[in-house]
Image: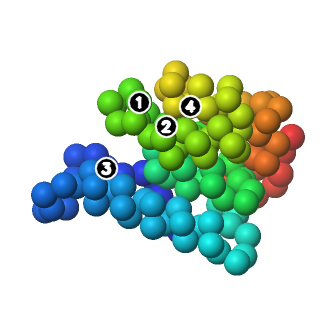
Amino acid sequence: MFSAGADLREDHGVADPKALRRGLLLRILLAMLECPKPVLPLLRGKAVGGGAMLALLADEVVMEQGANLAMPEFALGLPTPIGLSIIAVRGGRAAAHGLVQANQPMTAPAALAAERLRWVAAVRSNGAQSG
């Protein structure tokens, strides 16, 4: 699976593109929760919005050194209660505040340094684990 988040400029020719995006994201998130096998994404580059939610909902996350997570929804005027809930459960209130409310992307080294984000590992682009 690959996701860089949704392009908010696309309307897909439907009357309510926001509802379409929300519905699709919810179906994907529910499918991940129901998956009988571990979900282990490798983040290369940016995981933004829905892409960050998908990564954060996974069982474990591997991030390359240059990867980051971002949740710009609040800054764009798009509330994200699902994203806020996922981040708060997975990373704690400080991570939820930084990513969602303060709109501060989280890099792989920062994720490793954050005590509540132990489930994130950083790897070099050649696949060797670091840290």
Does the CB distance between marks 4 and 1 fall below 8 Å? no
How dense is the environment of label 1, judged by Cα within 10 Å: few (below 14), some, or many (20 and up)? some
Q: Return the residue at label 2.
A: 71
In this view of the protein, can residue 109 be seen by the observer?
no
Read off the residue under disc 1.
Answer: 74
Q: Position of residue 122 (x, y in %)?
A: 76, 46
C-alpha gap between disc 2 and disc 1: 8 Å
Q: Upstream in the sequence, badge 3 or badge 4? A: 3
Going by the numbered disc 2, the residue's amino acid type is Met
| Residue 32: mark in rendering | none
First in sequence: mark 2 vs mark 4: 2
Q: Which sits earlier in the primary sequence, circle 2 or circle 3?
A: 3
Mark 2 near mark 3, Cβ–Cβ under 8 Å? no
Q: Secondary structure at mark 4?
A: helix
Nearest to viewer (mark 3 / mark 4) = 4
| Dots 2, 1 in contact, CB < 8 A | yes
Q: As rendered, which of 111 and 99 lies closer to the eye?
A: 99
Q: Nearer the viewer, mark 3 or mark 1?
A: 1
**Residue ID at (69%, 48%):** 63
47 up-or-down from 22: above or below: above
Looking at the image, which residue is at 82% across and 42% down?
118
Q: Amino acid at mark 1?
A: Phe
Instruction: Kindly indicate whether the residue at mark 4 contacts the one at mark 2 (C-beta within 8 angstroms).
Output: yes
| Label 3 to label 1: alpha-carbon separation | 16 Å
Residue where numbered disc 4 is placed: 99
What kind of element bears circle 1? Answer: loop
